Image: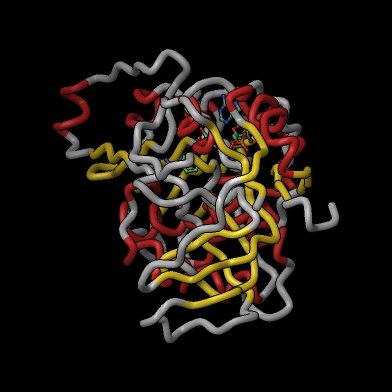
């Protein structure tokens, strides 16, 4: 079967579409015929080695896939041949990657695609939506009425944060370019601010939680905008990988900084996120990404485009040779 692999960590050119053996099904696994694979920033980090993790051999790139069940191993009772399924945790921590015609996935990391949901639109959404779901539920433990500031809110991850935080009953403030104000409002933002100006110069709100998806807002500015006991959650880093902040002001107001990376989410966290997300997908929410579908053979080009910021606000989705673009 065909798969996109890399032999050594390196640049996008390390990716090759080549013939590899079909996966051997182990206990509690499900063999999936892949229909589409999303390309995430983190796939480029795994390929380059910026995110260090155990890799299965051969190294098949990618973590989010959608496809149909071909076979189930002994012990699997929750899936049957022909089911449409998705996962968002292939390709790292010793697991086989997603960008192959067939992938063996642990049954407890696989979730059903709700009836009537577009498979490509779903696979494009699962990484950012699951990140937002786990951060809101488990890291922030956001509750109804709390004030949250979402910076970079018109981006892939930001849009998912708006919708899910709004659904939890939080009071949502967002920053984005002015051209995206309407979109942010439609998704659930109560107050839209322009990221070109500091938040403090545009409103006098203080927040219980702040998430910056751009990595471009100085940490000190966000810490200063927190209520006493408030929390900043980091999911990305500034380009130079460094922040400075006023330490006394920070601890005397009992503020918190949390880091999160979905690669370390537990099976249980991923499953709870999927349980929250699937009814949203079924209702047509969280599926607003603008897709750019390409063949598996374009994987190297797509990684380069994502790394160089040439995604033009689109989500790249790769489809195997057997599927129409
Ligand atoms: N830790 C994790 O588990 C995890 C999971 C998923 C993603 N991530 C990370 O999250 C980050 C965002 O991913 P994404 O796919 O959402 O990217 P994205 O779609 O490019 O979103 C980034 C957003 O930031 C906005 N922005 C640019 N400059 C800004 C500024 N100075 N202040 C505030 N916002 C600004 C951009 O606006 P314009 O469109 O106007 O430029 C864009 O809407 C990436 O670094 C990714 O690696 C981490």
Number of callouts = 0
Q: Nearer the viewer, residue 240 or 150?
A: 240
Residue at the spot 55% in from the left edge and 45% down from the top edge: 62
For residue 187, which quarter of the picture? bottom right
**Is residue 303 in sight in this rendering?**
yes
Asked where in the image residue 129 lies, by quadrant, the reply is bottom right
Q: Quadrant of residue 273?
A: bottom left
> Which quadrant of the render holds ligand 1?
top right
Report x, y in % for residue 250. 21, 29
Percent position of residue 156, x then y: 62, 45
Frontmost residue, 182 versus 239:
239
Q: Residue at x 66, y 48 (%)?
A: 2
Q: Is residue 109 left or right of residue 296?
A: left
At x 48%, y 57%, the residue is 130
Relative to the observer, which residue lies in front, 243 or 13?
13
User: Which residue is most to the right?
Assistant: 324
Q: Is residue 238 above or below residue 84?
A: above
For residue 273, say whether it is visible: no
Residue 258 in the figure: left or right of residue 210? left
Q: Residue at x 36, y 47 (%)?
A: 94
- What coloring was used for the rendering? secondary structure
Position above or below: 263 against 82: above
The spot of residue 193 in percent (x, y) is: 61, 36
From the viewer's perspective, tell me whether residue 81 is left or right of residue 320: left
Indicate the position of residue 139 as horizontal and vertical percent values: 31, 52
């Amino acid at each position: 079967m065909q798969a996109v692999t890399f032999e050594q960590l390196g640049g996008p050119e390390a990716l090759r579409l080549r013939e590899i053996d079909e996966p051997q099904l182990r206990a509690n696994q499900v063999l999936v015929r892949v229909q589409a694979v999303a390309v995430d920033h983190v796939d480029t980090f795994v390929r380059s080695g910026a995110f260090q993790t155990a890799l299965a051999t051969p190294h098949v790139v990618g973590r989010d896939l959608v496809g149909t069940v071909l076979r189930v191993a002994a012990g699997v009772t929750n899936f049957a041949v022909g089911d449409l399924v998705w996962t968002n945790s292939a390709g790292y921590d010793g697991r086989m990657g997603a960008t192959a015609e067939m992938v063996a996935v642990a049954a407890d990391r696989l979730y059903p695609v709700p009836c009537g949901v577009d498979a490509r639109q779903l696979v494009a959404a699962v990484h950012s939506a699951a990140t937002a779901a786990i951060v809101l539920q488990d890291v922030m433990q956001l509750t109804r009425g709390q004030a949250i500031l979402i910076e970079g809110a018109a981006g892939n991850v930001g849009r998912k944060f708006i919708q899910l935080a709004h659904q939890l009953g939080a009071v949502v403030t967002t920053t984005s370019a002015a051209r995206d104000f309407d979109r942010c409002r439609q998704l659930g933002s109560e107050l839209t601010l322009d990221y070109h100006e500091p938040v403090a110069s545009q409103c006098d709100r203080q927040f219980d939680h702040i998430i910056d998806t751009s990595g471009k807002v100085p940490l000190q500015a966000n810490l200063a905008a927190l209520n006493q006991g408030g929390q900043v959650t980091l999911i990305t880093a500034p380009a130079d990988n460094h922040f400075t902040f006023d330490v006394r002001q920070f601890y005397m107001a009992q503020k918190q900084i949390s880091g999160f990376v979905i690669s370390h989410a537990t099976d249980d966290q991923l499953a709870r996120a999927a349980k929250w997300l699937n009814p949203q997908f079924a209702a047509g929410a969280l599926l607003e990404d603008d897709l750019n579908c390409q063949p598996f053979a374009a994987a190297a080009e797509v990684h380069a485009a994502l790394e160089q910021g040439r995604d033009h606000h689109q989500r790249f989705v790769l489809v195997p040779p057997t599927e129409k673009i």
